[in-house]
Image (cartoon, coloured by chain):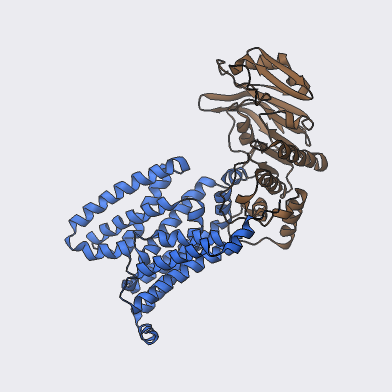
Chain colours: A blue, B brown
Amino acid sequence: MIADLVHLLGYEFVQNALLAGLLVALVAGLVSRFVVARNMSFAVHALAEVGFTGSAGFILIGLSPVLGLLSGSLLTAVFIGALGLRIRERDAVVGVVMAFGLGLGVLFITLYPRYASEAFNILFGAITAVSHGDLILMVAMAAVTIVGLGIMYRPLTFATVDPVVAEARGVPVRLISILFLLLLATAVAEAVQVVGVLLILTLLITPGATAERLTAHPGLATVASVGVALVSTLGGILLALVTAVPVSFYVTTIAFVCYLSARFGLPAIERSRRVTGS
Amino acid sequence: MCFDRATLAYGDRVVWSELSMTVPQGEFLAVLGPNGSGKTSLLRALLGLAPLASGSLDVLGGPPRRGNPDIGYVPQHAGFDREVPFRGRDLVALGIDGHRWGFGRLSRADRARVESALEDVAAGPYADAPIGRLSGGEQQRLRIAQALVGNPRLLLCDEPLASLDMRYQQEITELIGGWSRDKGGTVVFVTHDVNPVLGYADRVVFVVNGRWATGSTDEVLTSETMSGLYDAPVEVLRVRGRIVVVGEASGAGFDIDEPHHFPEPTGVHHL
């Protein structure tokens, strides 16, 4: 099995897959910290599903599905940002936009008869089908997300933890919300390449949710989140190479095991967290 | 801080009109009034978040502007998510660099400022605990440390005592009043209950229905002034060092559990 793996690592498609997985894990690990803290699971789901419509549309007119995914996801972010940023109205707006987006997706699939296998790839992920061109686009998307997050890290943290005080201290809370949605759309388009549209939450929620259970230190939590994303993604790709089971299954399983371990396997840490010194 | 015939309105709805008062540096101003009377809007005007419809407002020697580093802000206790990976000292550090773009570590000097701000509010013992698991009083102490760590000249507090029990109310008020006394800082303290700040407030402003009255506690909290503001008979009683405001405007008399609450105006038109 190890020998098989070493042999496989010599292939370009395997190297591409691992490099893509690395990029996805970095982006997902960083972004999911904020997705969890800002309660944006539903928005992530909508960005991914309308991204699916985007890639279906782009395939229909003969363009890159990855680019289509990014366009669909970004457009959704713009709609959500324009129609509803308040927590109260956000859920409804996300639902409304997602429903219409998926309706369009149905139309595109019907118009393109040979769509079945490509649709399956986008819905469940196809990391080993990542081409050289896709990889370049993925590097660009990862760079945009990471640099963008770096630029807005402190005000985003402030606006996430304590929005009322952040606004009082002059943080442009509304602008930050819109910028983060756009970054999230890019991260979603990136992560879909590994796990697909339907399993996107495993990379954009689980690492951040696991990290929250491990430490109260924000920096360490970010490191833990990236760690969980890396282990799940790269572990999933490697296991899938030597067995006949799809990558997505392994990625979701490893991530889930990480979460359960953090939740129930660390009673000592949990106890120390309860001590408040008062 | 100086309001000159300042009027604040949201669309057609006038919150308060022609407000004029001057608060010298170092004074403790209590902003009183029933819910929805525009107390928070007064803070938003000072923060540069709500522009005036007319009149002028001068804050620390200039017009209000967003993100003025000389202004600290303490909100109502609202609680944090229990699981959020964030500690007390991280919350205080936001008061130094949370508004700055980019990604950065605090300098050694700034970390020392965070430590001393934590000490000033006696939050050291729980500075490393997750903020979501602290009590309301502990969280408010941290918020005060966060507001003061930047060395402001003006501290704005929006109902900082709400949903705290009596002991915490006294502690928090003493922290804020003590800072004003020791550092010569100005405090604007929004509260629906005047009693916790009776020993600290140099001046009060009472806002209701777009009307207002300002002066010392004894000048404003009288049956005559209050009846004028509410445009209805209101009686102000002083009982064992506490002030109780009772009005017909509150409908069924007053709430026995919270006798210190100001009556909600009913049937009175906005100016």
Which quadrant is home to the N terminus of chain A?
Answer: bottom left
A106 horizontally vs B107: left or right: left
Task: Decide if residue B28 is in sight here.
Answer: yes
Q: Residue at x 73, y 45 (%)?
A: B152
Residue B266 lies left or right of residue A232; in this view the side is right
**x and y, in percent, of residue B67 in the image:** 63, 45
Q: Residue furthest right?
A: B182
- For residue B41, above or below residue A163: above
- Measured as percent of width and height from the top left, residue B5 is found at 66, 24
Instruction: Tell me what residue is drawn at x 48 percent, y 63 percent.
Output: A260
Q: Is residue A219 visible to the viewer in this orientation of the structure?
A: no
Residue A187: quadrant of the picture: bottom left
> Measured from the top left, where is residue A36 in percent x and y?
49, 55
Name the spot of residue B13 as percent of width and height, x first: 53, 24
Residue sticking out furthest to the top:
B233
Q: Which residue is depicted at the point 70% across and 54% down?
A: A277
B169 or A96: nearer the eye?
B169
Q: Is residue B262 above or below residue B88?
A: above
Q: Is residue A51 found left or right of B57 in the rendered image?
A: left
